[in-house]
Image (cartoon, rainbow, N blue to C red):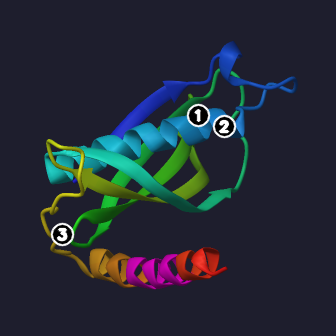
Amino acid sequence: MMTSQVQIVMPAHVNGVNRLFGGQLMAWIDMVAAVAARRHTHRHVVTAAVDNLRFWGPAFLDETVRLDATVTWTGKTSLEVRVDSVVESLDGAERMINRAYLVFVALDGDGKPAPVIPLVPATEEARDEWTRAEERRKIRLSQKARDAAP
C-alpha cells in the first residue's frame, strides 16, 4: 500500500534563492514515511534511521511536491519505508528530486518495541526491493557495530 502526501512549496519553505530547504523536505519525508509505517503496523512508530537520502534536484517556490511512501521490508519489530519525492509541474510533467529510506520501530502501549505484521512482497519489483532492503539492513547493522566499538 502506498501513502502519499502533497505539498505546495511556500515562502516559509525556501531559502534565499527560492529553493526548498533540504531540512523541510526531510521533515515531510519523515512524516509521510511514519504514516505508511503506522498504517502497516497499526501501531505507533519511532524513526530509528534515515539512510540513502539522495537529492537529485531542487524544488522551487510555488511548485507542487508529492511524496510517495511504501513499506519495502519488515523485521521482527522494525520496518523500512521508501519515500520518493516528485515535483509535479502545472502541465502534468513530473521529475523525481529525492529518494530516501527510513527505518521505524513499532511500539507497544508501554513504548517498548512490538512485533510488526510481516510484509509479503507480491510483485517482482517488491521482491527486488525487499532484497535491496536486506542489503541495506546488513550495512546498517555493520555500521552500528562499528560505531559501538571502543
The Cα–Cα distance between marks 3 and 2, rounded to whole angstroms, is: 30 Å
Magenta stretch, overall SS:
helix
The residue at the point 50 percent across, 27 percent down is 7
Which numbered marker is on residue 23?
2
Check disc 3 and report the residue beneath it. Answer: 119
Which dot, 1 or 2, sits closer to the camera? 2
**Tag 1 or tag 3, which sits nearer the N-term?**
1
- Residue in view at x 35 percent, y 40 percent: 4
Residue 9 falls in image quadrant: top right
Q: Which residue is drawn at 72% across and 49% down?
A: 57
Which three-letter amino acid code belongs to the residue tagged 2? Gly
**Image quadrant in which the N terminus is located:** bottom left
Kind of residue sitting beneath label 3:
Leu
Bounds of the magenta segment: 133-142
Q: Quadrant of residue 99?
A: bottom right
Q: Residue at 29% across / 47% down in the picture?
A: 45
Residue 130 visible to an observer of this rendering: yes
Residue placed under numbered mark 1 in the picture: 89
